[in-house]
Amino acid sequence: MAPITNNSDNITLEPAGLFAMLKTSPFVISTIPSTWLAYHYQPLFIFLSILLILFALYRYIFIRRAIYLVTPEYIRITTGILFKRTDTVELFRVKDYIITQPLLLQLLNLMDLQLKTTDPENPILWLRGIPQTNIIDTLRDRILQCRQYNNILEIN
């Protein structure tokens, strides 16, 4: 499964390899008909197969290179292969969190975590394919500490 490290109050999460394989499997499976068509009818269909495999490989690497860093002050999500993108949201901005576990993720002991924030640039943060842990309890404690430290009062 994906490694989880906890160095000096920082929690680093990464999508699991099985999750990445699950997300790229439709592209890999779709190469079978195009390879069959290339073998039986038109050899040019092999280019379609190659493109699908290359896209699946790119997608797999893209998913696996995502890094979710949770510190006592903020959450930082880094994605990308050639062009990196880093989104940072202060913890006191997190309003709600939702854990989603479809059947396949339950079988793989994984989860998707959705964080709703008040940040105008990132109203929703997704932590996809992470190992099932007690991250919600840790996040809740850190969010409350951050709000107390910054004197943030929530008004509904």
Image (tube, rainbow, N blue to C red):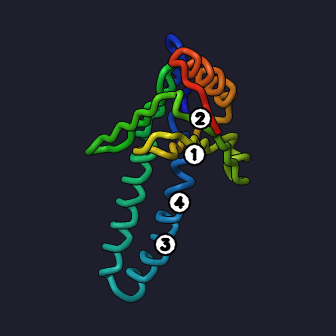
Question: In terms of sequence position, does the residue under pointer 3 or pointer 1 come before the other?
Answer: 1
Q: Nearer the viewer, mark 4 or mark 3?
A: 4
Badges 1 and 2: C-beta atoms under 8 Å apart?
Answer: yes
In the picture, which quadrant includes the C terminus?
top right
In the picture, which quadrant includes the N terminus?
top right
Q: Residues within 10 Å of mark 1 (few under 14, many from 20)?
A: some
- Horizontal placement of 70 versus 97: left or right? left
List the residue tagged with mark 2: 1
List the residue tagged with mark 3: 32
Element type where label 1 sits in the image: helix
Tell me the amino acid under the disc marked 1: Leu
In 3D space, how far apart are the residues under numbered discs 3 and 2 (Cα atoms)?
A: 28 Å
Element type where label 4 sits in the image: helix
Element type where label 3 sits in the image: helix
Question: In terms of sequence position, does the residue under pointer 1 or pointer 2 come before the other?
Answer: 2
Q: Quick one: 3 or 95, which is closer to the camera?
A: 95
Q: Residues within 10 Å of mark 3 (few under 14, many from 20)?
A: few
Tell me the amino acid under the disc marked 2: Met
Q: Quick one: 153 or 67, which is closer to the camera?
A: 153
Tell which residue pokes out farthest to the bottom in this image. 41
Tell me the amino acid under the disc marked 4: Ser
Residue 134 in the image: state x and y as whole percent: 69, 28
Tell which residue pokes out farthest to the top in this image. 8
Residue 23 in the image: state x and y as whole percent: 53, 55
Q: Residue 101, labelled with which disc?
A: none
Question: In terms of sequence position, does the residue under pointer 3 or pointer 2 come before the other?
Answer: 2
Question: In terms of sequence position, does the residue under pointer 4 or pointer 3 come before the other?
Answer: 4
List the residue tagged with mark 1: 18
